[in-house]
Amino acid sequence: MGETNEAPIKLDEKLDNRLSTIEEQNKQILIYLEKKNKKKSKGDENEERGNWSNPLDFLLSCLGYAVGLGNVWRFPYLCYRNGGGAFFIPYVIMLVFVGLPIFFLELSLGQFSGSGPFTCWKYAPIFTGIGIGMFAVSAFVSIYYNMIIGWAFYYLFASMRSELPWDRCDPEWASDNCIFNFPKIANCTEKGYDFNMTDGTCRNDTTRMGFFNRTLAGEFGFKQTLPSEEYLEKVVLGSAYSDGIHDLGPLKWELVLCYLLAFVFVTLSLSKSIKSSGKVVYFTATFPYVVLIILFVRGLLLDGYEKGIEFYITPKLETLKNAQVWKDAAVQIFFSLSASWGGLIALSSYNKFNNDCLRDSLIVAIANCATSVFAGFVIFSYLGYLSTIMDVPVEDVAKSGPTLVFAIYPFAVTQMPVAPLWSIIFFVMLITLGVDSEFVLVETVVTSLMDRFPKLRDYKLFTVMTVCSIFFLLGLSLTTQGGSYMLDMMDTYAGGWNILFISFCECISLCLVYGIGRFLMDIETMLGKKICGFFPYAICKYWWAACWCVFTPLLVLFIMGFSWYDYKGMHENDPEHFPPWADALGWLMTLVVIVSILGTPVYMLIVRSGPLGQRLREITSPTRDWGPQLVKHRMRVAEYVPNYDVDPWGKSDIAVKYMSKEPPLPEYPNLAFTSESVSEKF
């Protein structure tokens, strides 16, 4: 009997020991999984799409996207055209009531949905066309914006010599009106020349040697030109040999190679993931500020700088009665902040769910506008200097667009000691200002495609290369002799009236269709009860609601109406270089966006079945998978949205997902635990 009782006892002991071993194994496995979970939490929250490595990457990317070439030339130009310092008043008003609300709206929408501009409209599919329009705008702007960066590369290489090629009137390309060939002469007879009282010039027989009366000479077409301006038009662009957009002429292979280099640079920066461009912007977003400060200090040491700054800050309040001033302020805000282009949604879609996007909106918007104001001081200090040496009013020196950046400023650089070094620094700054904006424009297109076709995420490099190759081929017309006219047309129509229309539709979609109350709750789910670490969200949310539902759409609607009423085509403003079909081509670009927004609802109603009322409800109601991309975040949304589907994709909990991916630990080949036992720990 003793032996028969002893065997079961030993068997029970062995079983207990085995169970203890299994329990110990399970504990160690749980510890292992918990460590894995903590390790992953420090990286990507959304493993499928990826996230920014840290919030600073995102902040600098937004800042680099918003701060671009327009801050250097467009804002200062608008200031002196619209009353100097008086322009600050409508500019700030438009920033507060239009620019900042749209900026915050897009960051919130992208971060909450974790989707790019193609797929973030699932709260009301009827507005999917807005994403298509943003996709088109970013594609159009990417094509011509990179050409400006290509010009900067051209000048950068041209600056790498002991003497800048545009610091004199080279006989190979300079005209008789070049400033050194056609100087001002106070007394013709002292130089041995004859007065020509008809055209105000000094002549040696029939040869013009200079002028003594600028007004008379100008009436006969004898006007001084800067060597840098002629170098731009005759050597770099070749636009002097083109009659307009209808006369493109041959390709300029130097520009083709520089244009290609710009796209290669963008491709390499975006090749791996959002993290690669997130590191590049640490340089591209900060270096321009260093250069602007250096150039400003240098500008203050030049003769006549005070004339330019005085002109810049002196307000002409009577100009505020002109509606054109308010229109320019609104357009500049959209242009400067890059709002309604889709890039902000694309960037914020890679944020972690609880990132403080309101804080980022305030920092980027204020920093961007402060940069524009500071760049104005830098530019106008040099314009005052040029005004002094050319003996002309400041308003006759400064010009908008590429002329200011690639003609006026390079000439000012030639008057400095060690001019090639200053030129290299300046054009490196222009490249860094341009490329981080170009990064986001191309990333917007790529992100939209990958969200629409998720399989492309496994081929990021191939996707970026394909997109950049297509843009390069489509933009080859910009490298011709008439390419600058093509660029002007694209710049006028690609991001003008259609951007205002997109922002108006964004406000309407969230306030009248989705519901402003729910959108405010969505934001609170991400930000929590306090914003910026201390300010109660409950206090400021009504301000944003008022802007999105009242102030912003009404102001945008007014600006759209006025711009349409006051519309003048490029042919009307410059019939010599732009025939009527140039405006038609431009409006086709605009209509791509408008038709996308208005045509998508019609298409959706046609392809769906059922009664009209049912179809309309379907395309104006959130889809089943609308909302955050992760189950744990959707569970928080379910607390205030009845019958909200927290797992429309059938995703497993975190632990089971790890279990399905990780092979058994080598020291524990026979794992003896269940998903239920592990999920309790997560």
Image: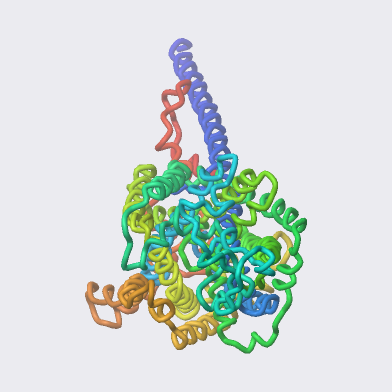
Seen at 54% across and 27% down, the residue is 24
Q: Is residue 555 above or below residue 105?
A: below
Q: Is residue 385 above or below residue 431?
A: below
Image coords of residue 244 (percent x, y): 36, 68
Using the image as rendered, state which of residue 121 and residue 500 is in the foreground: 500
Q: Quadrant of the N terminus?
A: top left
Query: Toward which corner of the image does residue 580 lie, by quadrant?
Result: bottom left
Seen at 36% across and 56% down, the residue is 480
- Colour setup of the view: rainbow
Seen at 43% across and 82% down, the residue is 568
Note whether residue 373 is visible: no
Note whether residue 297 is visible: yes
Q: In the orientation shown, which residue stands out farthest toward the top?
A: 3
Image coords of residue 409 (percent x, y): 61, 58
Image coords of residue 657 (percent x, y): 43, 42
Q: Is residue 480 above or below residue 211?
A: above
Seen at 38% across and 77% down, the residue is 575
Using the image as rendered, state which of residue 662 and residue 544 is in the foreground: 544
Question: Position of 120 compared to 434: left or right?
Answer: left
Using the image as rendered, state which of residue 168 and residue 208 is in the foreground: 208
Query: Toward which corner of the image does residue 74 lie, by quadrant?
Result: bottom right
| Number of numbered discs overlaid on the protein picture | 0
Question: Position of 424 compared to 498: left or right?
Answer: right
Q: Quadrant of the C terminus?
A: top right
Image coords of residue 234 (percent x, y): 44, 57
Using the image as rendered, state which of residue 255 and residue 250 is in the foreground: 250
